[in-house]
Image: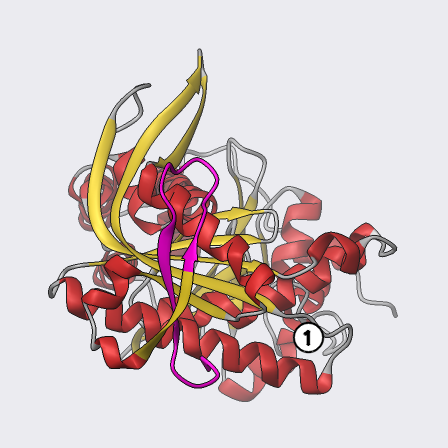
């Protein structure tokens, strides 16, 4: 006889789950809800609150041996975060990469089925076919006797899930299930607050950078506000980008740019720099003078050299090959809210930013991979650099001395 998947659905009851709880359990359940919507909601450490959730459920008598949540996230390289809890092992997180095999496996998982049915599901792993869900064999081997999965649909349309499993010989009792149902509105409400806050932080960081996203979320959103920072400035762009990509499809151009950014950006971040802007094929980054101007310039120079090495290594194995030019300058960066009405751009402006851009453009004319300003050179050992001449810069009244590293600049 074929297995009836409808038997996986945990039916609702007309009775209020709170009425099914003993006085002791009812008090503990209320305390858990109060915590999640009170102190827990204000706690910035979501992992700590999740651990508290599991500990409090156990304290309320739930024979919980495994908790898991699947949290869909908006991230450049990840699709979801899976959180696990087991007694004695505490909480652990596993990031699911975008377009990974694990993401594909989700489609045949209990959470996917729960969302498809729009209801809670539960089953005894020993009583359902192993082909029903990929997780069944794992649950059986680990000794679990009862598994419950509860779907959550967020206000923004994203779908997450929570699952609870026990190794108790009797499984979860009717009162155990009532405990989960009674507390679940508070669990899902807290979860949504946490997830939406995480999405807000992650998306703003992804599109405007680490420091700007912090400033935006702290209230720096009014047009005309400007914040100045002394820093080493790195500006990189791809040489002959227009001619190189003239006959490419949009998909191929995107892949090429991502290859280029994968060479430059990790080098910047490894050496403590912050990428502020991607402007077509241009990359603008700064290195703050947290330990002095000399240190900031030294880190910027290391990042530039590492980026050039990464481009050279990439070109040995991938086509089309490309070259880049990098400019280094030391000066003042101004963050500013610029725009009109309700449409603003949190961008970087100022004379020194413009100069770095002009020096990067000069790399092509001089057939150089790395050029630095006189301001930058003076903050390091001048013997590391040779003169590349004095040059007119668009927008600047006087020719400026430009320098290149001694040797090949890599």
Q: Look at the picture and state if 305 lies above or below 154.
A: below
Q: Percent x, y for residue 212?
A: 32, 42
Query: Which residue is labeled 1 in the image?
Result: 134
Highlighted magenta segment, given as a residue range: 390-410
Residue at 58% from the left image edge and 76% from the top image edge: 311
Mark 1: few, some, or many residues within 10 Å (few <14, many ≥20)?
Answer: some
Residue at 30% from the left image edge and 58% from the top image edge: 50
Q: Is 382 within the magenta?
A: no
Residue at 41% from the left image edge and 63% from the top image edge: 389
Q: Percent x, y for residue 264?
A: 50, 68
Q: Quadrant of residue 170?
A: bottom left
Q: Is residue 191 visible?
A: no
Q: Quadrant of the N terminus?
A: bottom right
Q: Quadrant of residue 190?
A: top left
Tell me if 107 is positioned left or right of 347 in this view.
right
Residue farthest to the top, as pictured: 341
Numbered marks: total: 1
Is residue 202 or residue 325 the one in the foreground?
325
Q: Is 404 within the magenta?
A: yes
Q: Is residue 334 visible?
A: yes
């Amino acid at each position: 006889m074929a297995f009836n998947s409808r038997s996986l659905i945990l039916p609702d009851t007309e009775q209020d789950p709170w009425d099914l709880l003993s006085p002791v359990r009812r008090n503990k359940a209320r305390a858990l809800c109060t915590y999640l919507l009170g102190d827990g909601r204000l706690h910035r450490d979501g992992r700590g609150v999740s651990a508290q959730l599991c500990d409090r459920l156990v304290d309320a008598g739930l024979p919980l041996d495994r908790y898991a949540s699947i949290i869909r996230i908006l991230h450049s390289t990840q699709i979801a975060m899976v959180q696990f809890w087991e007694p004695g092992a505490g909480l652990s997180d596993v990031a699911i990469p975008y377009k990974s095999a694990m993401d594909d496996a989700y489609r045949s998982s209990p959470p996917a089925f729960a969302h498809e049915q729009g209801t809670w599901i539960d089953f005894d792993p020993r009583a359902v076919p192993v082909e029903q869900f990929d997780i069944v064999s794992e649950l059986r081997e680990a000794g679990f006797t009862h598994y419950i999965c509860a779907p959550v649909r967020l206000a923004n349309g994203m779908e997450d899930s929570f699952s609870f499993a026990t190794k108790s010989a009797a499984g979860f009792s009717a009162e155990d299930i009532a405990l989960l149902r009674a507390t679940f509105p508070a669990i899902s409400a807290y979860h949504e607050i946490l997830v939406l806050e995480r999405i807000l932080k992650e998306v703003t960081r992804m599109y405007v950078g680490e420091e700007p996203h912090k400033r935006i979320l702290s209230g720096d959103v009014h047009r005309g506000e400007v914040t100045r920072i002394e820093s080493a400035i790195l500006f990189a762009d791809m040489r002959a980008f227009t001619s190189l990509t003239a006959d490419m499809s949009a998909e191929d151009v995107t892949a090429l740019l991502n290859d280029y950014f994968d060479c430059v950006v990790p080098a910047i971040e490894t050496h403590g720099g912050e990428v502020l802007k991607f402007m077509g094929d241009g990359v603008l980054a700064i290195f703050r003078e947290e330990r002095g101007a000399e240190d900031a310039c030294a880190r910027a120079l290391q990042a530039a050299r590492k980026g050039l090495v990464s481009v050279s290594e990439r070109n040995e194995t991938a086509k089309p090959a490309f070259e880049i030019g990098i400019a280094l300058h030391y000066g003042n960066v101004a963050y500013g809210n610029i725009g009109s009405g309700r449409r603003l751009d949190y961008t970087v402006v100022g004379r020194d930013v413009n100069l770095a851009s002009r020096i990067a453009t000069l790399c092509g004319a001089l057939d150089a991979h790395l050029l630095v300003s006189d301001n930058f050179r003076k903050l390091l050992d001048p013997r590391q650099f040779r003169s590349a001449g004095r040059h007119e810069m668009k927008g600047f009244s006087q020719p400026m001395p430009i320098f290149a590293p001694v040797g090949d600049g890599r």
